[in-house]
Image (cartoon, rainbow, N blue to C red):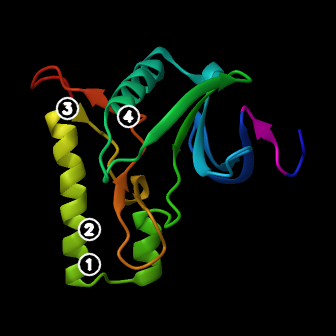
Amino acid sequence: MDADHPTIGEYTLTCKLGGGSSSTVWKAEHRTTGKVVALKQIDLLKLTRQLKNCLDCELSFLSSVEHPNIIRLFDVFQAENSIFLVLEFCAGGDLAAYIRDHGRVQECVARKFMKQIGAGLEVLSMRHILHRDLKPENILLSTMETDPILKIADFGLSRVKKNDLNY
């Protein structure tokens, strides 16, 4: 492995995008196709039973849905005591950074954004998925260009709603 650009499976890691207590998200490039993706690395040794259930829910939901306002899962593989989710890369960063960089958002932009978030939430509702961590940091922008597509991401704390009492 090159120290500057380590490889995991078929991917070369180019930089760290973020992370939490049990996962790290990397920007990566497929070694043969050159396709840029986000690799979510989940440390299996740090997974509690509850976090394992959340991961199962995340994988089940993301592998079964394809919607423009929900982050896309391309593949899953295991290596080095970790599970890697190969996800769509969103070059525009997250909504929190967008708001920080742009300040007050114009009403017409806010309206577009809310429609897109609403469309993604409608899919979650139809599938009885509770995201449980919806915040600007978990809403990604497809591009830095004008008119980005918003994508709901990070389903690591999501749950399937079995009845009205299961939150």
Mark 3 neighbour density, 10 Å: few (under 14) some (14–19) many (20 or more): some
Name which residue lies at 24% across and 35% down: 130
- Find the distance from the CA under tag 3 to the CA under tag 4: 11 Å
Q: Secondary structure at mark 2?
A: helix
Q: Nearer the viewer, mark 4 or mark 1?
A: 4
As drawn, the residue found furthest toward the right would be 2
Return the residue at label 1.
109
Locate the N terminus by quadrant: top right
- Dot placed on the residue nearer the N-terminal end, 4 or 1: 4
Q: CA distance from mark 1 to mark 3?
A: 28 Å
**Left or right of 51 in this view: 126:** left
Q: CA distance from mark 4 to mark 1?
A: 27 Å
Q: Is residue 120 left or right of residue 46?
A: left
Q: Label 2 neighbourhood size at 10 Å, few (<14), some (14-19), many (20+)? A: some
Can you identify the residue that label 4 sits on? 62
Instruction: Determine whether label 1 and label 3 are within 8 Å by CB.
Output: no
Instruction: Tell me whether the residue at label 4 lies in contact with that at label 2, contact meaning CB atoms closer than 8 angstroms.
Output: no
